Amino acid sequence: MQYENYIGGRWTGRNFTTNVNPSDTNDEIGMYASADADDTNSAIESAVAAQSIWRAYPPSERISVLRNIGNALLARKDELGAALSREEGKPVREGIAEAGRAGNTFHYYASAIEHAQGETYSSALPKTLIQTRRNPVGTVGIITPWNFPLAIPAWKIAPALAYGNTVVFKPAELVPSSAWALTKIISEAGLPDGVFNMVMGSGSVVGKAITTSSRLNAVTFTGSSFVGAEIAADCISHGAKRIQAEMGGKNSLVVLDDADLTIAVEAIIDGAFKSTGQRCTATSRVISTPQMYPRLVEQLSARIPTLKVGDALDPSTDIGPLASQQQLNQVRKYVELGVSEGAELIAGGHEIRSASPGFYFEPTLFAGGHSQMRINQEEIFGPVVCLIEAPDVDSAIALANDTQYGLAAGIITDSQRSIERFLDSADAGMLHVNRSTANTELHVPFGGNKSSSYGPREQGTAARDFFTSTSTIYSTTGTD
Ligand code: ADP
């Protein structure tokens, strides 16, 4: 079946390409349109034309549209989650949880705009009142990655629409089916034509047309640091658009000698291998003090081989395939690099050949490495975790900061003093105590430091800063 783009309230498309299931590449999911620059510009013009209409919609009507989208996502979360897993490769229970989260995100922003959006201040002048008012930024380009095909689009689209912006959404090339399903739901929710537009296609054509358009007011992007830097430069040089970029991570989990070993092992398994390690918040560096280090090696090398790697739609699967051949090649390359750099391969490290052709790779543990090895500095984006030994708490925390990234970091310890030291000095946007570095909630700020993020935080009340601009209003009354 052929699936089209959604532009100005109409389905339209050409240049269809086939999307396949990474658990079984013989399984063809559908044929999806690839937009060109003209299609993208039509989507942008539709969104610009609809801006004044949507901006004037009373919040109560915006709320009702958002609730319709949230309700549809929640009612269909099992089916949407399974389709997501078939397309992206994460185990089906994770796919269903993600579809549910997407639904809850639309409900969260429906509730968020019920609250007052401005503030009132006193003035130094007589009979004068100062107020702030939040206005929509205008028309927003949304560029998303493939690793959370419903949740990331939802956490950008929902606040964009809630705060009165119109949208041009460009999903990642690998996950058009999830984007199309979400778009279909949005198209049936009661929005005026042109408020929401979806254009599938490549980053170099569709993405570039968005970031270089001077008709848009803002762009929000999640993806790699390399692309993020190019996008930020394009946005600034073409119309000085507001930009929000969520990029890579190389997240450290510090495990101290006094840690609960079971909590530590489960946090590492969850953080490193859930979603096949393809999360920007994945735990990829475990930094441990000397007594805990050998215990972690022993426990993890026993636990990792028990994890079942398999078809994403098999409910007994713990770890699905990588999302694409390119991802598989990248993981294989980094494992070879780790061995050549002198790290010790403790578990996994190999591609898995299964009955159905898919991009399967063993969950992999390295030990004996040091922080400056490339496998401990570069984002692998796969099921690979490295153990690094540190002599004491302070050096462990210093090593946790020893990367160009600063998205998430965690500590496992029973010591309140060590927790305080970690919270004071860990250089990351999201800090976790006695849990994995991943797993975030939708109502609180999401984002990082250093090369991980650029621009305001996402999610929760933080999203309002990006999707609105503030006017400050001075009113003097009774000047007689
Ligand atoms: P990932 O590997 O997670 O897909 P990328 O950074 O390659 O990360 O891509 C994230 C998103 O950015 C995708 O939707 C992709 O198509 C888009 N993209 C890639 N290159 C560009 C570009 N030069 N300009 C705009 N968007 C791009």
Image (cartoon, rainbow, N blue to C red):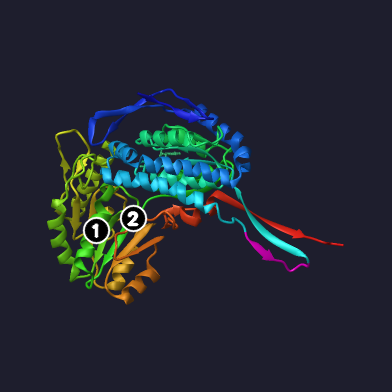
**Percent x, y of residue 223:** 40, 45
Q: Residues within 10 Å of mark 1 (few under 14, many from 20)?
A: many
- What segment is highlighted magenta in the picture? 119-126
Q: Which residue matches tag 1? A: 268
Q: Residue at x 22, y 59 (%)?
A: 266
Q: Look at the magenta stretch and give its main secondary structure.
A: loop
**Where in the image, quadrant-wise, is ligand 1 located?**
top left
Q: Which residue matches tag 2? A: 439
Which three-letter amino acid code belongs to the residue tagged 2?
Asn
Note whether ligand 1 is within 8 Å of mark 2.
no
> Residue placed farthest to the bottom in the image?
417
**Percent x, y of residue 383:** 24, 49
**Percent x, y of residue 217:** 57, 43
In the rendered view of the protein, which quadrant contains the N terminus? top left
Which three-letter amino acid code belongs to the residue tagged 1?
Ile
User: Do the residues under discs 2 and 1 have CB atoms within 8 angstroms?
Assistant: no
Q: Residue at x 70, y 61 (%)?
A: 130
Out of 429 and 89, give the one closest to the viewer: 89
Separation of residues labelled 2 and 1 (CA atoms): 12 Å
Q: Residue at x 35, y 59 (%)?
A: 403
In the rendered view of the protein, which quadrant contains the C terminus? bottom right
